Amino acid sequence: MRTVATIVSISLVLLFAILSIREDGIFKFHPSLMAVSYLGFMFQAINIFSVDNTSRSAPITKRKQILIHSLFQVGSIICSIIAFTAIYLRKEQGNKSHFTSWHGLIGFTVFIWSLLQSTGGLLLTILQRYIRSLGLTHAKLRIYHATSGVLLFTMSCFVIVLGLASNWFKTKMPDEKIIYSVIFYLLTSSMLFLAHKCVEQVKARYVKRKIAMK
């Protein structure tokens, strides 16, 4: 199942990259790098912790999982900052208002959330001793971080789905409404699949394990 999810993730990233490659100016970096950031890096950062019993590969140690997760998140943040800067400058060049659509408004919220989420994850990793000295439970904070991350990824998928209804995406699609609708629902279903995979991963790692330990 992890392999299928990875294939879906890479396919979505490639699709947005191909659709964006012929765009003029800096706008091409917005849809392409946002897809790389969230559908690519962020999804893989969460998926690395997946408990996949069907995989034949050797299990990855916890330390390596955290390292890979951190590297993916660094890539996600770098790409999202470049993508956000690209659309911000494009709006400035065209003397257009910022955050006037649901896509832009919720997208900005997700972008800020991403920065806070990554900062929280970094602090959770490097300040473990300090956290314990404050009487906080590191295990619970990890659950909060994981839950927040899954919600963040789900919201990022929702923002991208809103982007599928944008004029830019529609100009890339065939004129026939039926074909556009089929593509729209296929892409939406693919992103829902990735979000569902992340939710199930967190449930398996924390919720079901906690129930089994009782």
Image (cartoon, rainbow, N blue to C red):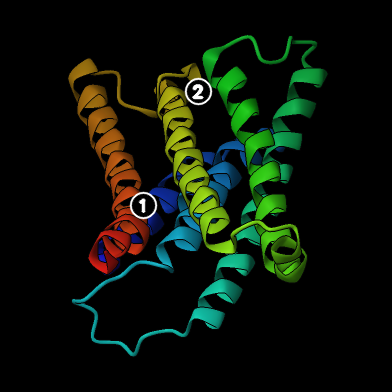
Q: Quadrant of residue 165?
A: top left
* Mark in front: 2 vs 1: 1
Residue 168 is tagged as 2
Q: Closer to the N terminus: mark 2 or mark 1?
A: 2
Q: Amino acid at mark 1?
A: Cys
Find the distance from the CA under tag 2 to the CA under tag 1.
Answer: 29 Å
Which SS class for mark 2?
helix
Q: Is residue 179 above or below residue 67?
A: above
Q: Residue at x 72, y 15 (%)?
A: 98
Horizontal relation, residue 119 to residue 55: left or right: right
Q: Is residue 69 above or below residue 98?
A: below
Label 2 environment density (alpha carbons within 10 Å; few <14, some 14–19, many ≥20): few
Q: Quadrant of the C terminus?
A: bottom left
Q: Nearer the viewer, residue 213 or 37?
A: 213
Spot occupied by residue 138 in the image (x, y as percentages of width and height):
59, 62
Q: Quadrant of the N terminus?
A: bottom left
Q: Residue at x 45, y 55 (%)?
A: 43
Q: Is residue 24 visible?
A: no
Q: Is residue 213 visible?
A: yes
Q: Which residue is mark 1?
A: 198
Q: Residue at x 40, y 58 (%)?
A: 10
Q: Residue at x 74, y 10 (%)?
A: 96
Spot occupied by residue 17 in the image (x, y as percentages of width and height):
50, 48
Q: Amino acid at mark 2?
A: Trp
Q: Nearer the viewer, residue 168 or 12?
A: 12
Which SS class for mark 1?
helix
Q: Nearer the viewer, residue 22 or 1?
A: 1
Horizontal relation, residue 99 to residue 6: left or right: right
Q: Across the whole image, how many numbered discs are drawn on residues?
A: 2
